[in-house]
C-alpha cells in the first residue's frame, strides 16, 4: 500500500464511518477501484485508522466526555450487548465481512428502510434525557450492525429514534457509543497483531503510513460529523436511503458482471 492509497482509504473511512451508509461497503468499492490486494497490512490498516475517526468524536464533544459518571454508565449499558455478542461471534462476523453479496444486499435493504424512517420514527418526545432503558435499547439495535452493510450509525440512530429521541440527539448518542464500541473492536484486533512477532514487524515497518492514515481519518471524520448533524436535522434520512440503494445496486451489478470485489 502506497501513501496515496492510504490517504484515499482514510478519506473513505472518515467520510463514511459516522454516516448511515456503511463504511464497509465503501471500503470494498474503494479497495476494488484501487486494485488493492487484501494483504495482512491492508486489513490491519482499515481497522487501525478507526482510532483516528473516533478521536474526532472525543475532540468535537470533549465537554460531554468530561461530565458526570452517569454519562459513562449509559455508554457502558449501551455497549454491553454488542460487546458480548461481538466477542462471542467474532470469527463468524469476520467471515460475513468476506461476503460482498451480503454487504450489497444490506445496503439496498437498509436504503429502502431509511426512506421510511422519518415517517415512522421521527416522533420526538418532550423528555430527551438518555436513561438506562433507552441506552440498552440502542445497544441492542447496535447488534444489528454486526451484519456487514447495515451501518452501525444507521442502526443506533434508528434505535434511538424508536425511544423518542430527536434525530439530532439520537445521532449524537450514536457518535458517543462509537467510541467504546470501535475502540474495543479495533483494540482487540490490534492486540492480536501485537501478540504475534509478524504482526509487530508489520506495524513497525508501516508506522508512517498508519500515522498518516489516522490523521487523515481524524480530520475528514470531524468534517463529516459536522455536516451530518446539520443535514440530518434539516433534511432527514431520505437522501441517504436513495444513496444506499444506488451503492448497493452498483455492487450487485458488478458482482453479476463477474468483477472480483473480494478485498476484505
Image: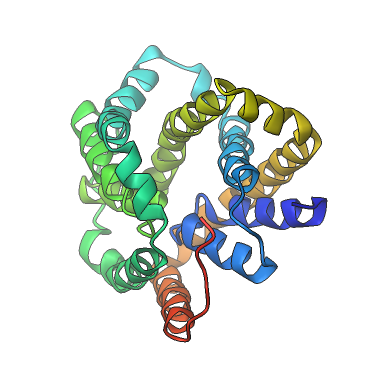
Residue 198 position by quadrant:
top right
User: Which residue of the protein is positioned furthest toward the front in this rendering?
Assistant: 198
Residue 178 position by quadrant:
top left
Residue in the image at 45% along x and 67% along y: 235
Q: In the shown orientation, is residue 218 left or right of residue 72?
A: right
User: Which residue of the protein is positioned furthest toward the left in this rendering?
Assistant: 133
Q: Nearer the viewer, residue 139 or 105?
A: 105
Residue in the image at 47% along x and 17% along y: 67
Q: Nearer the viewer, residue 3 or 256?
A: 256
Residue 145 seen anywhere in this rendered image of the structure: yes
Q: In the shown orientation, is residue 17 left or right of residue 80?
A: right
Residue in the image at 59% along x and 40% along y: 44
Image position, residue 103 (x, y; %):
38, 64
Task: Name the colouring of the figure.
Answer: rainbow
Q: How many marks?
A: 0
Image position, residue 123 (x, y; %):
24, 56
Q: In the shown orientation, is residue 147 left or right of residue 205?
A: left
Image position, residue 91 (x, y; %):
34, 40
In the rendered image, the vertical position of residue 187 relative to residue 225, given as above or below = above
Amino acid at each position: 500500500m502506497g501513501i496515496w492509497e492510504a490517504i484515499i482509504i482514510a478519506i473513505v473511512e472518515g467520510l463514511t464511518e459516522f454516516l448511515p451508509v456503511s463504511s464497509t461497503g465503501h471500503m470494498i468499492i474503494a479497495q476494488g477501484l484501487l486494485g488493492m490486494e487484501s494483504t495482512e497490512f491492508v486489513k490491519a490498516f482499515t481497522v487501525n485508522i478507526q482510532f483516528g475517526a473516533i478521536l474526532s468524536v472525543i475532540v468535537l464533544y470533549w465537554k460531554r466526555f468530561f461530565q458526570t459518571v452517569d454519562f459513562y454508565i449509559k455508554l457502558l449499558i449501551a455497549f454491553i450487548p454488542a460487546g458480548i455478542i461481538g466477542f462471542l461471534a467474532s470469527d463468524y462476523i469476520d467471515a460475513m465481512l468476506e461476503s460482498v453479496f451480503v454487504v450489497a444486499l444490506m445496503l439496498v435493504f437498509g436504503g429502502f428502510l431509511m426512506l421510511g424512517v422519518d415517517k415512522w420514527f421521527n416522533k420526538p418526545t418532550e423528555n430527551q434525557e438518555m436513561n438506562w432503558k433507552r441506552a440498552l435499547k440502542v445497544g441492542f439495535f447496535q447488534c444489528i450492525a454486526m451484519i456487514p452493510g447495515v451501518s452501525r450509525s444507521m442502526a443506533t440512530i434508528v434505535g434511538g429514534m424508536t425511544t423518542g429521541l430527536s434525530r439530532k440527539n439520537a445521532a449524537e448518542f450514536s457518535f458517543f457509543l462509537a467510541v467504546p464500541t470501535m475502540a474495543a473492536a479495533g483494540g482487540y484486533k490490534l492486540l492480536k497483531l501485537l501478540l504475534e512477532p509478524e504482526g509487530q514487524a508489520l506495524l513497525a515497518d508501516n508506522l508512517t503510513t498508519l500515522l498518516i492514515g489516522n490523521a487523515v481519518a481524524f480530520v475528514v471524520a470531524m468534517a463529516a460529523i459536522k455536516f451530518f448533524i446539520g443535514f440530518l436535522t434539516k433534511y432527514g434520512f431520505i437522501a441517504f436511503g436513495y444513496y444506499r440503494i444506488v451503492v448497493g445496486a452498483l455492487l450487485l451489478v458488478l458482482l453479476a458482471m463477474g468483477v472480483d470485489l473480494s478485498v476484505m
